[in-house]
Amino acid sequence: MTDETLAHIKHSIARAMGGRFYPEKFKGIDLDAISSEADFQKLPFTDKADLRGAYPLGLLAAPEEKIVRVHSSSGTTGAPVIIPYTQQDVDDWTLMFCRCYETAGVTARDRVHITPGYGLWTAGIGFQLGAERLGAMAVPMGPGGTDKQIQMMIDMGSTVLCATSSYALLLAEEIEKRGVKSKIRLRKGIIGSERWGEKMRRRIAGELGVELYDIYGLTEIYGPGIGINCKYGSGMHLWTDYLYPEIIDPKTGENLPGDQIGELTLTTLCKEGAPLIRYRTHDLTRMLPGVCACGRPYPRIDTIIGRSDDMVKVRGAIIYPGRVDALLATIESVSSEYQIMIDHLNGRDILTLFYETPLEKNTLAYKALEKMVEKSFKDKIGLTPVAKGVAIGELPRSEKKTTRVFDNRY
Ligand code: ZN
């Protein structure tokens, strides 16, 4: 950590202490005594549960008259989290988003088809502001209505698709099914940072005929747009003039060195409405070493390989969806879509792996594939699952994030 970064962090802490949330959280800590990276790393983490406790406006750290907007993150359980934004926060987010588009090679000549939702819960507006700042033409579709999406995509000659990976896949499959691929002018896909495997990436890229970019972000910290990969690789540049990243061991909370995989933790450097210090994203990744071939000065995080909460232990083997993605990508006749169910039956944990396959049910090839999936799972991940092939399209596609692991043991 440079002196300059430390100064920015201290400034952000001071700003955070102007609200109600952090004076409570940091009670009894001598913040003036923070003079090194090691001191900073002793500060307690902020977690989503803390933010829920601050509902509705407990996170507010700027005078109310400076707040111009709120967004909210829902999560699957518990109270929502409300994040207040000042105009400066909105401007900073817009600028970061514009930078993401530029990094992906999007220009003012592009027509940007935006399928993420608008409103309180989601951040379609971020995709739109960034596109407008760039000078591109935003086509603010929002989610759903696949017929209309494809029709508009054709009529408007959309060149850039913004979507979650599962929705991009659904659109790709529908375009294929309707035989309208030749009318689609898409050249790039900007895909929300949900963890997705190489196989799904290849399918979407292949079926839509586009170059794909992973955009990163979370509502608690602006929203999508705080990082993206460039054309040189899958690592995502993180806009560290606005954020300070750390990688921690999700179990112990210790900072991890170098390029080890752990949980990404972020500190905002400029945020006014709701600054966050050492916020746990629960996203598993690592910092990529060295400077990117594109020469950008921003460090890179690796593709998100899973959620620290999705990491499950079954009969001693550690399983997270990223590993399963990688495994299935190596097996022919298995599509990118799968689901894992973990149950406790007769005193034993059973892992069932459902995967999509074009093979016809109960044929010899189908049964051989099940055996093969079971064997490579055992070889690479360390336990034998019950493998079950299902037809293509049988597993749920979602406009939101896809849940892959269902742990029914508790
Ligand atoms: Zn780069």
Image (cartoon, rainbow, N blue to C red):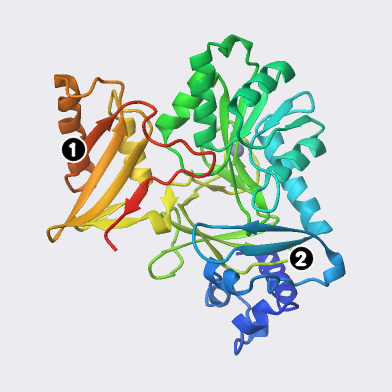
Quadrant of residue 124 in the image? top right
Position of residue 372 in the picture relative to residue 57 (left or right): left
Position of residue 151 in the picture relative to residue 278 (left or right): right
Question: Of the numbered discs in the image, which one, if any, rests on residue 272?
Answer: 2
Q: Is residue 23 above or below residue 239?
A: below
Disc on the earlier residue, 2 or 1: 2
Which quarter holds ligand 1? top right
Question: Of the numbered discs in the image, which one, if any, rests on residue 374?
Answer: 1
User: Which amino acid type corresponds to the residue marked 1 in the rendered image?
Assistant: Glu
Q: Is residue 46 above or below residue 138?
A: below
Quarter that holds the C terminus = bottom left
Identify the residue at image location x=53%, y=70%.
49
Q: Say few, some or many: other residues with alpha carbon within 10 Å of mark 1 (under 14 / 14 to 19 / 20 or more).
A: some
User: Which amino acid type corresponds to the residue marked 2 in the rendered image?
Assistant: Glu
Residue 209 x/y as whole percent: 55, 18
Q: Residue furthest bottom?
A: 28
Spatial CA span between label 2 and label 1: 51 Å
Identify which residue, 348 or 301, lies in the foreground.
348
